[in-house]
Amino acid sequence: MNDMTIESKAAPPRETVESWLSAFNKAVAAYDVDTAARLFATTSFWRDLLAFTWNIKTVENQNGVHDMLRDTLPHLGRVSLTLAEEPTQSGDVVEAWLSLETGIGRGEGHLRLRNGEAWTLLTTLTELKGFEEPTGTRRPMGAEHGISRNRRTWKEKREDEASTLGFTTQPYVLIIGGGQGGIALGARLRQLGVPHIVIDKHDNPGDQWRKRYKSLCLHDPVWYDHLPYIDFPKNWPVFAPKDKIGDWLEFYTKVMEINYWTKTVAKHAAFDEDTKTWRVTVDRDGQEIELCPTQLVLATGMSGKANIPGFKGMERFKGEQQHSSQHPGPDAYAGKKVVVIGSNNSAHDICAALWEVDADVTMVQRSSTHIVRSDSLMEVGLGDLYSERAVANGVTTRKADMIFASLPYRIMHEFQIPIYDKIKERDADFYAALEKAGFMLDFGSDGSGLFLKYLRRGSGYYIDVGACELVINGGIKLKSGVEIEEITETGVKFVDGSELPADLIVYATGYGSMNGWAADLISQEVADKVGKVWGLGSDTPKDPGPWEGEQRNMWKPTQQENLWFHGGNLHQSRHYSLYLALQLKARMEGLSTPVYGLQESHHLR
Amino acid sequence: MNDMTIESKAAPPRETVESWLSAFNKAVAAYDVDTAARLFATTSFWRDLLAFTWNIKTVENQNGVHDMLRDTLPHLGRVSLTLAEEPTQSGDVVEAWLSLETGIGRGEGHLRLRNGEAWTLLTTLTELKGFEEPTGTRRPMGAEHGISRNRRTWKEKREDEASTLGFTTQPYVLIIGGGQGGIALGARLRQLGVPHIVIDKHDNPGDQWRKRYKSLCLHDPVWYDHLPYIDFPKNWPVFAPKDKIGDWLEFYTKVMEINYWTKTVAKHAAFDEDTKTWRVTVDRDGQEIELCPTQLVLATGMSGKANIPGFKGMERFKGEQQHSSQHPGPDAYAGKKVVVIGSNNSAHDICAALWEVDADVTMVQRSSTHIVRSDSLMEVGLGDLYSERAVANGVTTRKADMIFASLPYRIMHEFQIPIYDKIKERDADFYAALEKAGFMLDFGSDGSGLFLKYLRRGSGYYIDVGACELVINGGIKLKSGVEIEEITETGVKFVDGSELPADLIVYATGYGSMNGWAADLISQEVADKVGKVWGLGSDTPKDPGPWEGEQRNMWKPTQQENLWFHGGNLHQSRHYSLYLALQLKARMEGLSTPVYGLQESHHLR
């Protein structure tokens, strides 16, 4: 996918790409939408991150391209796509990295041609003309050379801002939730000069990680996890322990000068249709404050709102019950009987940690789970894009993000299925042993594995870092494939009449759709107007259709004016925070931001 | 100096270099020291950072090379220098970047050939075989995959270390002083697995900067200031305000997992000749603790120990007196009469800040000062090595450090004089105006300007960021060229009979030699044994001979076993901390480290 070999100027790939680009640029300059559309293959995908659509949008095939260009070109000024690097060819596909410029801004692109026709095109807006970030040659001087009376130092200005913003001046953007999502977005807004406040209920930035269970480490490797602007150093662990990530986030928040209110909870928000601003009541360490931001971002996270199923009898259980997000780690439960309901990442991690302190722990598996061994995922699944090997091959994290973004969701499973076929073969003995232990396995409804499960439903998998061995050898007991009848005073009773006694029940039962947060904070009406957040509309389990082609409601305009959703893993927080920040900046500056193809809302939860 | 043009394989520079390297490698393999020495020009310089000498040492000319190789080769195992990049030619000088390998370790080198003979050679040791740092492909996994009972988390291990190191276990290295020097060294020792404690008197890492005067910003630009492992981000100011650097250092300390004791002062240290360890009594926030490190590093800084001249009558002054390092900034002195004695960096900064709050401020210049405008220094003096332009040309900070290190101190002035000639011409009107105001100027005793003044004496200059304009226009009053007679009850009296009334006298009179710290902490005997710290022995003002050719006693073995000095600006703290850390690591691991050419001690202060 990323052959760095430099071809000579006369080689076909460059000619092919230049010829296509020239025809494309000529057609769009002439507003000749028909011709432009015919440069795309019959089956083709154009994914645009803001550059044309002020939206995150994939259009398909010639008619999709036609309609999109017809509606967007009139607003864009002069558009050009140019070659940024020597193109490469692999099989019948020619790949090219592009630079993009429109009247509004600059960006990057990626093109795959087949038989001279565009098969996939990615276009991204990465900076707004006139509002470029102050980095590199544009970085601030810091010291104000020259002389002036009563100058304010950097520290005094920061203190001034901290004491006035939210009181005598209002943030343009309020971000609710200060995990990696809110922090990455806050950093970008600071760089773009957008007044912002990030609020979070915890005592310190990073506590979102620190307060989770003791043995938690990131399941994604370091190359996948960088935040904007400051990469993790070369000595950073592949899978960082939670407290180390917590320290990094705290450090990053301060160094990037994010306006971050700790110990702050949003109580209620309402949109004022007249002033087009929000009224948000927050409790900041006991003080009630009303904030009036223009834009409201919910960055409370996919893992924000706990989802606890309403089992019969829960109220009478005499032991301890907790959602996985509340689980404090194993130490208090040494020698105790614990039932963990659920069989995804958190369930496995919690069970393994409990086993380590010699608890008697049973995992209750209610439906099949996709399991992939961490080593295999790193080597087969991620290694080409996010690894030391990738970096050595010139695939920086930025480039990897762009390659990943260039794969249309409609056909991403086609790229993923062969990877998981390979993993199945590589780890055949492992999977057989799990099944022998009674564990119900799947690889996604179409065998496309982890990433698509994540993108479609954000759940249903475990990246194995050791717990599976315990399931196989019985260190973690497994109760699988039998429905729960009720919770009794002393444990969990199943429909087959069996009963598991428990001192502790952990509900590792996942999290609800983010619009549940909007319902709590704003109103059910607004939550319903927005509809379900996350998922592609793939019509696979927990990702009902119709097909949306992008993650529903994430990082892009919603049906509720000035309300945005942001979050995801560190990769997504890093990559998509840029596009969300640019959308907010453009609106603050009063630029025209006509949205093409605003998503409709589907499903109430 | 850094032409990145790729030449074809047949071009002369590569042939010239490869032929020289081949002859060199052959000669050293055969222990043929005579032949090896004859590969060097009659006037030539070989600077070695540990790789051959286990010292920081420059040898000169064929006989210097001969003697050094004669004594060092028997310890080194197989030695090879190989080409790392395509060489370049400029005039009659061919330059080449080298890779180096000995039986002990690996490193980098830089070679300049003239007429096929070595004119300058730099050799550096950057890693020890068998003790490579855990970075990149060797980075730690973080999560311990697999299952084990009673595992300790990262946080628990850190807490264990914090509670035992210095109590039930002893650090191998104790670093006194936790500014950028101690922090950079601490970070490198952590990576090398050397148990260490950094102690510092302040409440928090970074307070060394925060507690200085309010308007202080770094006078060196960001590209010159990176710490090891984590670069400042691309949005970092060119000249960072002191509080921002303070924040960075604080979080760097935490993220790099440096064992750092705040609020800790070393009271006394003594070397035990029998056990070859130190006994160091420290006061940690009121608790007296005895530490027994094997190695003791004084990183108290060039700017560590205040130097206040003993003017007659100081004790009777009724106003406030303070050393520049104690000056809290201008706010309390609005409208007051202030006399600042001194005319270097701190004096100028303090005067300008006082002017800003409308204090009546006079600078007392007792000897000539080298002034260079910040813009000119950046563009003419540093721009080829440390700037956005340099980075764009492929001169990373690492490469710039190596280029700078490759210039022998004996002839560095020859490279610097033309730069300052250019600056004099460029800023002729500015310098004329300063002289017209009565300001006494110099460009160093040989016209070689700022860097050599810094390397020779660490003082005697101001990088102008605005104060000179005030000296020129009288905003800062100047009293120049008249000796101080005495301090009176109400001000400063001069030998010409004039008197300056003062509410505040600031002694911006610099700092003493670092062996003064050794005298206070250990004994005058040890301080005298070590001799003066800093300076090259150039026999110019405040840098008495004889010629040493390297900075006296810095980052290398001293006459006092197991005592080391570390410090300097951010550039030096970054660059030389590597070599000091490797020397400490090698000793901890019991490697043979025969020191070639251990410096003699000169001058008691």
Image (tube, coloured by chain):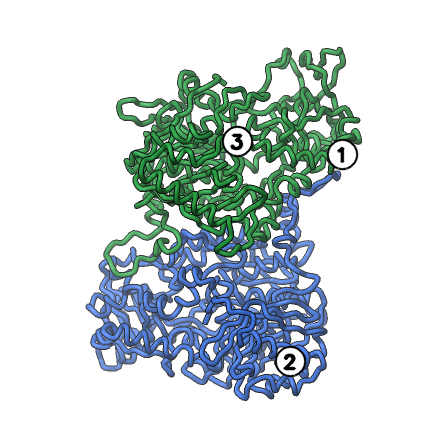
Chain colours: A blue, B green
Q: Which of the image's four quarters has the N terminus of chain A? A: bottom left
Q: Report crowding for label 1: few under 14, some 14 to 19, many 20 or more residues within 10 A (C-alpha).
A: few
Q: Report crowding for label 2: few under 14, some 14 to 19, many 20 or more residues within 10 A (C-alpha).
A: some
Q: Tag 3 or tag 1, which sits nearer the N-term?
A: 3
Residue A313, given in percent of the width and then of the height, sits at 33, 75
The answer for how far apart the CA atoms under marks 1 and 2 are is 56 Å
Reading the image, the residue beneath label 3 is B409
> Which chain is mark 3 on?
B
Front residue (pair A389, B597): B597
Residue B67, given in percent of the width and then of the height, sits at 38, 28
A213 w.r.t. B42: above or below: below
User: Image point 65% across, 86% down: which residue?
Assistant: A35
- Give the amino acid type for the residue marked by disc 2 in the picture: Ala
Reading the image, the residue beneath label 2 is A23
Residue B260, given in percent of the width and then of the height, sits at 42, 38
Front residue (pair A120, A506): A120
Q: What's the mark number on residue A510? A: none
The answer for how far apart the CA atoms under marks 2 and 3 are is 60 Å
Q: What's the mark number on residue B428? A: 1
